[in-house]
Image (cartoon, rainbow, N blue to C red):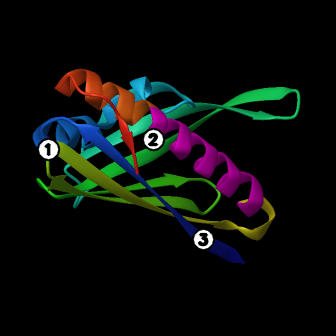
Amino acid sequence: MLRRDTFQYSVQARCPRAEAVALLGDLARQGELHPLITRVRLLPPRPGARASYAITDRLAVGPLRFSMTYEADVLVVTDDEIVMVARQRPATTVRNRTRLRDEPGGVVRIDVEITLAAPAPLFRYAFRQARSAHLGLARRLGEVLDRAGDGPAQPA
């Protein structure tokens, strides 16, 4: 039986929206943001995908450390939306929908919704890891984009 849940976060950064889209729409650049990623390899695009990747994360369960590789597809990249889906065995998917919009003062607002589905025995661990990693990514994202736009980060 699969379980599913969603979490959301927002980031504001002082940078051009195109800079945020370029960074978020290219999973090869996610290693600088995502705290678990250790390797990203470009794959031939799967049907319906703009780009496909094999991504390796370094995970921990108590004192045990292990690597896990999964596939991810970038499905949509526009100036106001990015949609990605990652698949890992057994039957685990993470869907990322990111929306971007300009705000006054040269600020871009990035709203992210992450939906994770996983088999019930794995769900709590997978959801906890995904939320922790993506909130870490959010902190780094604001810093990286503000450096690119030369402005201070503004938490949302």
Q: Name the residue under label 2.
A: 138
SS under mark 2: helix
Q: Earlier in the sequence, mark 3 or mark 1?
A: 3
Q: In this view, does 150 lie above or below 75?
A: above
Residue at (14% x, 44% y) in the render: 105
* Residue under pointer 1: 105
Q: Is mark 3 on a helix, strand or loop?
A: strand
Q: Which of 51 and 135 is in front in this view?
A: 135
Is residue 112 visible from the viewing direction of this image? yes
Residue at 87 percent across and 34 percent down: it is: 62
Residue 78 lies, with reference to residue 66, above or below; the image says below
The residue range painted magenta reads 123-139
Mark 2: amino acid: Ala
- For residue 143, which numbered disc appears in the image? none
User: Mark 3 near mark 2, Cβ–Cβ under 8 Å?
Assistant: no
Looking at the rendered structure, the secondary structure element under dot 1 is loop
Q: Which residue lies furthest to the right in this view?
A: 63
Q: How crowded is mark 1: few (under 14 residues within 10 Å), some or many (20 or more)?
A: few
Query: Looking at the image, is mark 2 or mark 1 nearer the viewer?
Result: 1
Instruction: Answer with mark 2 or mark 1, whichever residue precedes in sequence.
Output: 1
Residue 102 in the figure: left or right of residue 109:
left
Mark 3 — residue? 5
